[in-house]
Image (spheres, helix red, strand yellow):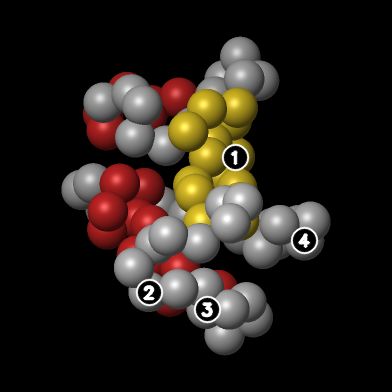
Amino acid sequence: MEGVTVGRKIDLMLYNSYQTLTHTLITMFAKYQDFEEDGTSYKLTFQNEQGDWLLAGHVPWQSFIGTVRRLAILRNEK
């Protein structure tokens, strides 16, 4: 939901991969936005503990869950 702030905590220990986390987030927000099921209309980004924004999936999963502070779902340009 680009441009919309949602204050919700997510227990990352419930997930074992980027795919399961992404699927859950898209399912959670699909009723508010027109997300495509195949994942081509969005990308998941995160802010690490240094304040840098990175694409999810660019670091190993275990490193991700140890450093992520904020998540953002951004719509891809078509």
Q: Amino acid at mark 4?
A: Val
Report which quarter residue 57 is drawn in: top left
Which residue is nearer to you in this view: 75 or 62?
75
Kindly report the distance in space between the C-alpha atoms of the residues bearing marks 2 and 1.
23 Å
Residues at circles 4 and 2 in contact by the CB criterion of under 8 Å? no
* Alpha carbon distance from label 3 to label 4: 14 Å
Query: For the residue marked with disc 1, what is the amino acid?
Result: Arg
Image quarter of the N terminus: bottom right
The nearer-to-camera label among 4 and 2 is 2
Query: Which is nearer the N-term, disc 1 or disc 3?
Result: 3
Residue that numbered label 1 is attached to: 70
**Circle nearer the N terminus (3, 4):** 4
**Image x and y of residue 7, in percent:** 69, 58
Q: From the image, tell me which residue sits under label 4.
A: 4
Extreme residue in the top direction: 50
* Image spot of residue 35 (x, y percent): 52, 73
Dividing the picture into quarters, in which one does residue 59 lie?
top left
Rendered position, 71 above or below 40: above
Q: Which residue is mark 3?
A: 30
Between label 1 and label 4, give the one nearer the viewer.
4
Asked if 16 appears above or below 78 in the picture, the reply is: above
- Image disc number at residue 39: none
So how many labels did they put on this image? 4
Q: Cα distance, mark 1 to mark 4?
A: 13 Å
Mark 4 surroundings within 10 Å by alpha-carbon count, few (fewer than 14), some (14 through 19), many (20 or more) = few
Query: Label 3 sits on what residue type?
Result: Ala
Tag 1 and tag 4, C-beta contact below 8 Å:
no
For marks 2 and 1, the one nearer the N-term is: 2
Q: Which element is circle 3 on?
A: loop
Which residue is drawn at the image coordinates 23% and 46% (left, top)? Answer: 17
User: Which residue type carries mark 2?
Assistant: Glu
